[in-house]
Amino acid sequence: MKTPLLLSLVTLLTVAGPLTAGEIHGQVTCKGLRNSADAVVYVDQIAGKSFPAPAEHALMDQKDLQFQPHVLPVLVGTTVDFLNSDALLHNVFTPDKCADRFNLGSWPQGHKKSYTFKNPCTATLLCNVHPEMEGYILALPTPYFAVTDASGAYTIENVPDGSYTVKVWHPKLKSVSKQVTVSGSTEVSFSLTK
Amino acid sequence: MRGETPYSRRALAHAMIAVMGLALVFVTVAPVHALPVFARKYHTSCQTCHTVFPKLNPFGEAFRLRGYRLPSETEAQVKEKPVSLGAEAYKRVWPDAVYPSDLPGGAPLAINVKMANVYASSKDDSGHQVTHNDFQFPQEANLFSAGTLGEHFSFLGEFTFAETPDGGSETEIEHAQLHVNSPFGPPNLVNFKVGKFSPDLEDRFQEMWLMTDNGVDTLFAYNPIGLHGGTGLEEDVGISLPSLVKGIEMYGIAHHRLFYTVGVTNGLGPGPNDTVDGNSSKDVWARIDYKFGGMGLDGDTTGVTLPPENWREKSLRVGLLGYSGDGSGIDFPVEDANGVTFNVQDRRYQRVGVFGSWIWNDLNLFGVALHGTDTLRVSDESGAQLDETKPGYDTWFLQADYVIKPPFQVSLRYEDLTPGDSSAPKSRFLNANFTFLMRANIKTMLEYRRDLEETQNYQLAAVLRFAY
């Protein structure tokens, strides 16, 4: 009984080994800010590799007079649904050309409008009904990305082993990048300044 | 050139002595500008910016000149998160939308209360000494409002409620000013201020920046408009230098250490028919300073080693200042000793002066020397010109502030005023202060001011101030 089981495990490990996805995790320190949330850590374009757009839509909510989440990274080609969860009118528009400077108009609570991000883009979202509202959608070339929490911690899961350019973007700070070799669980930390 | 005028110089000289004696008692005490608004905003102590409020240390001066912003201010340093009036990205949308700004996160209000026990002695008209001991609890309260409005604007307001002897109060808007900070060009180089304010022409020596309770009356309360040597020291009518102006000022800092200011204001007033200015001419001023050593005027510390005691440094700041105005058409009635009334116009007044401030660790020695000239035209009640003179006067003061220990600080000031007319009496005052900072926002002072020309004129004040 034991021998077949052992053989199966050895076989499984031998076959699965090279395909095992690792992860990139670490810490982003946002100097001068109240916390280190909302930094997007992502793997940049991988030469010769493309990723199909997901069929599933991403969601950007307008709730309690805020864009939620404040920062939403998606893969290029993703359609984002903009939901109004407030009992008042909202609007969504962007001044950014990479997103066609879209203006989706206004719609009532519970309704959605959509936009597909066809190109790599950092789109600032604004609401012309509530000028203080601000959000961001990053359309990225790979599906390997994560957003930091308030402590600056992040984890990008399922990243195949290999060498990549890893970039960090933040709404208020200068972007940085690093060459990273991923081998299993790999720790990479960043420091951002104005 | 001076013509003959029908009055008695000796009688006027006696009158001026009496006026100056009264001035000792009635010239207002200094308003205090400590702004707990900023202590709340940054969650920091008053001591961050003040040696003893309202006197600013070098860091506080940089904070003020930067439009109430910390040098290299970061978001994390601002503990009260501002209220957004428009997302940052709206800058790119302008003019299709209003340019973004923000509001202070907390109510930008602070209160400063002053109580004083004033023992005053003066000589009355008949030559008798009059003394009085008065509890003035409170003497005044000041409501402050200050803060920033987004990236390029800041504001300061001060509303003073001065208690009157009958229990009522007199109110005054002492400051209502909007600053435009670095709207273009390098940071801190070009700034504008509009409203009612103490001009930066008087930076570091106007009463709002002094640790003493009394201001420098010989500089600010002297009125040279009169028959011989002016009318002496008088509350709110001194035009030697204006303590507060309603105007527009441009100021800035170049290369961290060069400070300049130019400004324009109404001048003599009020005018007829509820106008503020007495005529349509405007007064102008200019000042230029350079600071050697110590912290830069914008807070820059490149290449400078400063001690951890933030009031200490080794620096010298020197400056030149000038003020000019035209009072043509504005009549000031004056009486001679015989009761005959004349009208005097100050058709051209000019002030030039030098400022110096030397900080050597715990000692700050500073002062101003000012020369003033006034073109005074005397006419009778029918408007016929009787005389036109161009008297000059000289005034200077020197003040030494010393930090014994942070809670214990002392100050000694000598003031000197010499009117251009030799028949007019000189004014010389000594002002001594001992301050005990009980807490960062509570201070007590014992201040003695003596008229060195008339020994019966003096004042001893025990002052309690607290801010919150």
Image (cartoon, grey):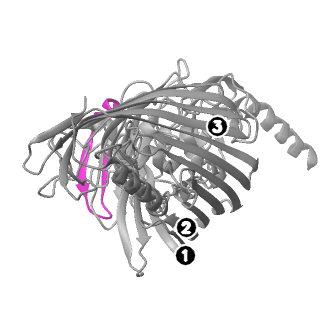
In the visual, does B3 lie left or right of B293?
A: left
* x, y percent for residue B139: 50, 71
Q: Which mark is residue B134?
A: 1
Q: Is residue B86 visible?
A: no
Structural distance between the alpha carbons of marks 1 and 3: 32 Å
Q: Tell me whether the residue at label 2 lies in contact with that at label 1, contact meaning CB atoms closer than 8 angstroms.
A: yes
- Asked which secondary structure carries label 2, the reply is strand
Q: Which numbered disc flags the more N-terminal residue, 3 or 2?
A: 2
* Residue positioned 82% across, 41% down in the render: A8
In the visual, does B138 lie left or right of B338?
A: right
10 Å neighbourhood of mark 2: few (<14), some, or many (≥20)? many
* x, y percent for residue B365: 64, 37
10 Å neighbourhood of mark 3: few (<14), some, or many (≥20)? some
* x, y percent for residue B336: 26, 53
- Asked which secondary structure carries label 3, the reply is strand
> Magenta stretch?
A96-114
Q: Residue furthest top?
A: A47
Q: Are marks 2 and 1 on the same chain?
A: yes
- Front-lying residue, B466 or B125: B125
10 Å neighbourhood of mark 1: few (<14), some, or many (≥20)? few
> What chain letter is assigned to the residue under label 1?
B
* Residue positioned 76% across, 39% down in the render: B308
Q: Label 1 is placed on what type of residue?
A: Asp
- Front-lying residue, B189 or A143: B189
Q: Are marks 3 and 2 on the same chain?
A: yes
Where is residue B150, by image quadrant?
top left
Judge depth for marks 2 and 1 and give the one in front.
Answer: 2
Q: Is residue B363 above or below residue B21?
A: above
Where is residue B79, by image quadrant?
bottom right
Determine which residue is flagged by label 3.
B365
Q: Label 2 is placed on what type of residue?
A: Ala
